[in-house]
Image: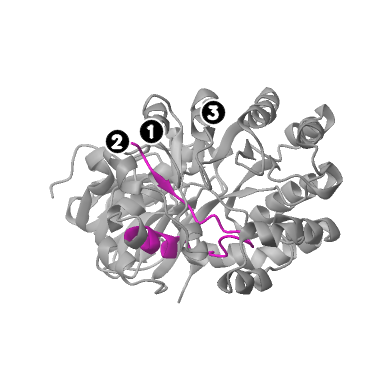
Amino acid sequence: MAPSNALTARFLPNAAIDPASSSTTANFEMTIIRNIGQLVAIPPGPVAGDALSSPPVIENAALVIEGDRIAWFGAEQDAPAEARRLKNSPSPQPFPLEGEGVIDASGGIVVPGLIDCHTHVVFAGSREGEFVQKIRGTSYLEILESGGGIRSTMRAVRAASEDELVSQSLPRVRRMLSAGVTTIEAKSGYGLDAASELKMLRAIRRVGELTGVEMVGTFLGAHATPPEFAGQNDAYIDAMTAPELLSAIRDEKLAEFADVFCEKGAFTPEQSRRFLVHGAAAGLIPKVHAEQLSASGATRLAVELNAASADHLEFVTDDDLAALKGGHTIPVLLPGCSFFLNSPPAPARKLIAAGLPVALATDCNPGSCMIESLPLVMSIAATLLRMTPMETLVAATANAAAALRRADRLGAIAVGHQADLLIVDAASVDQWVYRVAVPAVRTVIKAGRVVHESR
């Protein structure tokens, strides 16, 4: 296809780059990715309707990075003169084929870095015993009543030091990075007391510092009620919205979002509202675990509070869909959870037909979805949710960025956007998603720098 005006935009001037937002040095070195078989130019989110399945695809493409930003992209033969130089060479030169500053995609596809916009990836302990119990027919509620479930992980998190939380979580996040995830939302919610929740949020931040992954902290203070507050949900909400706790989260910049599990057996819509309103007063943007086990009205609460996202939606209703269409809350689907639990999935095709910008995430957690691979979840979404491979990619990039209020910077291939990019050893997105669980991500670029290579 012929490049559009956006695809042939002139080279991004240095003045347009904000060094303060970059994790790279400020010398704005140039990197050229060439010999791209297909460049999938996903636009900034949110993306819905027909655009969800048909972003521009440029054959035989090239892309230029300056500093931490995308400076130009298009057909390699159309590369502007400014892209035909390396670093600070004063005059145009033949398009470089190799050497410092050149990455050969070897005919692979280039896509935005994946964004896992709903995870519980930082935790302590392991619950494979419960996995076997579920296979044998034990219900989630039976496991919970026997002291397992979230409370099992709560005990492990409370017993772990911050260093131990970091060391146990680092391998998971590094594996996610190797699978192409450059940004991860990570929730607390396994401490269930002030000190342990703060410990989790500090560990999340440290994991990001140690891996180069952009970790986005979410305070999931209202995940479950701990034993010391059994039967006292309102008192527990009071404890999790105490001014000193919310002030510590705000002052240390430990979280951007507040999340709640609004569900029968967890927290009512009114309790959820109270938690989220207090969080918003402390600068935390609402998110909601909504309609996972039943139709609870949580989605409509999310829209009412202008939440960034409503997540799960397995039991979403027509009224919920109407509310989502009238608001700005992103519906986040978590099909890995349905796969892991052998439970009904969210009605993705119904949401897409309604014109909603669906996002995808792993929901990586030790109990209901011990899946770390977002590409695997994309394949699961294709089979369980009947999403096309391209729809799954847009959902895991542009729309996932929108679910984290980062669509102006992440999740797209657009001039001026942060250069979070993947080189994937596949002929097309269809082939990548079709080859279920095959490690195909060759190169991971975060903010203009190569942070992982598989070879």
Mark 2 near mark 3, Cβ–Cβ under 8 Å?
Answer: no
Residue 126 percent coordinates (x, y):
70, 68
Residue 238 percent coordinates (x, y):
80, 30
Secondary structure under the numbered disc 2 in the rendered image: loop
Residue sitting at the far bottom: 455
Secondary structure under the numbered disc 3 in the rendered image: helix
Residue sitting at the far left: 2
Please state, as top left, top right, bottom left or bottom right, where the C terminus lies in the image.
bottom left
Disc 2 to disc 3, C-alpha distance? 19 Å
Secondary structure under the numbered disc 1 in the rendered image: helix
- Comparing 210 with 26, the one in front is 210
Q: Which mark is residue 301?
A: 3
Mark 2 near mark 1, Cβ–Cβ under 8 Å?
Answer: yes
Give the magenta range: 354-382
Residue hosting label 2: 354
Q: Amino acid at mark 1?
A: Leu
- Comparing 70 with 383, the one in front is 383
Residue 197 percent coordinates (x, y):
77, 46
Quarter of the image where one finds residue 267:
top right
The answer to which of marks 2 and 3 sits earlier in the sequence is: 3
Q: Which mark is residue 427?
A: none
The answer to which of marks 2 and 1 sits earlier in the sequence is: 1
Q: Residues within 10 Å of mark 1 (few under 14, many from 20)?
A: some
Q: Which mark is residue 321?
A: 1
Q: Amino acid at mark 3?
A: Leu
- By secondary structure, the bulk of the magenta-drawn segment is best described as loop
Q: Where 184 sits versus 238, above or below?
A: below
Residue at coordinates 52% horizontally, 43% vertically from top-left? 294
- Comparing 349 with 230, the one in front is 230
